[in-house]
Image (cartoon, rainbow, N blue to C red):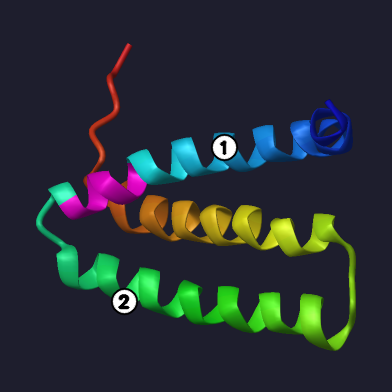
Amino acid sequence: MTLILLAKPYFYFFLGILLTFGIGGIFFNGLIGTGHTQTALRIQTIFTIFYIIYSYFMIKHWYFGLYWAWGAEIFYWLAVTIMSLLFLKPKMAFPKF
């Protein structure tokens, strides 16, 4: 029971992580589905390096709290989503009303 009570303040933060992952994962897989796996690999490699550097400095160097450590997930998926959208935008067909 104490584990549930200790995890309760982080619930909404985890919900935000899950939402950014869910949306970003769809667009990132859409990028892979168009046959641009090399571009997807580059995007993922670049932002994974930033993710590791960010996590290292937030946790080991500057001793920020757990929210900032988990914030790396949100920053990572937001960046991957934005890059995927920027790449897919010219190729997306929008309905005309």
Magenta residue check for 68: no
Front-most of residues 33 and 63: 63
Residue 18 is marked as 1
Query: At which x and y percent is residue 25?
Result: 38, 44
Mark 2 lies on residue: 42
Residue that appears at 67% across and 32% down = 15
Query: What is the span of residues highlighted in magenta in the rendered image?
Result: 27-32
**Who comes first in sequence, dot 2 or dot 1?**
1
Q: Give SS at disc 2.
A: helix
Label 2 and label 1: CA atoms lie apart by: 23 Å
Image quadrant occupied by the C terminus: top left
Decide which of 72, 27 is in the foreground and name it. 72
Circle 1 crowding by C-alpha within 10 Å: few under 14, some 14–19, many from 20: some
Q: Position of residue 43 (x, y in %)?
A: 37, 70
* Tag 2: amino acid: Arg
The image quadrant of residue 41 is bottom left
Q: Residue furthest bottom?
A: 61
Q: Is residue 43 above or below residue 60?
A: above
